[in-house]
Amino acid sequence: MRTQAAAVALLFLLIAGVAQSASLAPGPGAAVINADAIRWLPSSFGAIKFAQVLGNWSDSKALYTVRFLMPDGSAFPVHYHGSDEVLTVIQGTFMFKAGTNTARTGGRAVKAGGVLFIPANMRHWGWAVHTTVVQINGIGPHSVHVLK
């Protein structure tokens, strides 16, 4: 119940952030970014590509949206974040696993259109089934702490 309340609160903050944040668009009003305008860049996760869609996740108290393009079988290492995040699967299937056990068994499938709330400081990792695109929304500053 507490996690559900936190997710609802985060979604409210995201909506409020869109209405109040001037950093989302170059000028006043709505920001529209179509898929063909997204520029994929190399990430620090091997073959996984990264795109900064809106905002900047290092900005304090600012809404951000990033996407990751994950080839089939690619994975994020075990890590945690200093802030909550909301992950939406745009394409493919993302396998989510809480904890530090990296066996590819027992994960939870988040399919295209599905949403995953990940609270701050939760150790987790995940991998792609087929080519997968995930979108992550949150409020900065965002930090990623990879566990060795």
Image: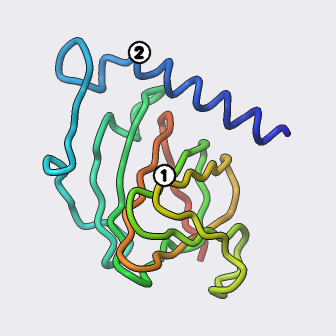
Looking at the image, the residue that sits furthest to the left is 37
Residue that badge 2 annotates: 19
Q: Is residue 13 above or below residue 84?
A: above
| Residue drawn at the location 22% of the way across and 12% of the way down | 28
**Closest to the observer: 115 or 58?**
115
Q: Position of residue 27 (x, y in %)?
A: 18, 16
Sooner in the amino-acid sequence: mark 1 or mark 2: 2
Q: Amino acid at mark 2?
A: Ala
> Relative to 123, does residue 135 appear above or below in the rendering?
above
Relative placement, left or right, of 140 versus 131 is: right
Please state, as top left, top right, bottom left or bottom right, where the N terminus lies in the image.
top right
Which picture quadrant has residue 59?
top left
The spot of residue 93 in percent (x, y) is: 48, 70
Image label count:
2
Seen from the viewer's position, the closer of residues 146 and 87 is 87
Mark 1 neighbour class, 10 Å CA radius: few under 14, some 14 to 19, many 20 or more: many
**What residue is drawn where x is 67% and y is 37%?**
7
Give the answer, above or below, for where 132 lies relative to 25: below
Numbered disc in front, either 1 or 2: 1
Residue at position x 17%, y 54% in the image: 39
Residue 141 % position (x, y): 48, 37
Residue toward you, 44 or 127: 127
- The residue at which mark 1 appears reads as 88
Horizontal side of 68 relative to 84 (left or right) equals: left
The quarter of the picture where residue 91 lies is bottom left
Instruction: Locate residue 13, reporting x and y percent.
Output: 56, 24
Crowd around label 2: few <14 · some 14–19 · many ≥20 (10 Å): few
Q: Is residue 115 left or right of residue 8?
A: left
Q: Amino acid at mark 1?
A: Thr
Q: Is residue 62 left or right of residue 105?
A: left
* Alpha carbons under labels 1 and 2: distance apart: 21 Å
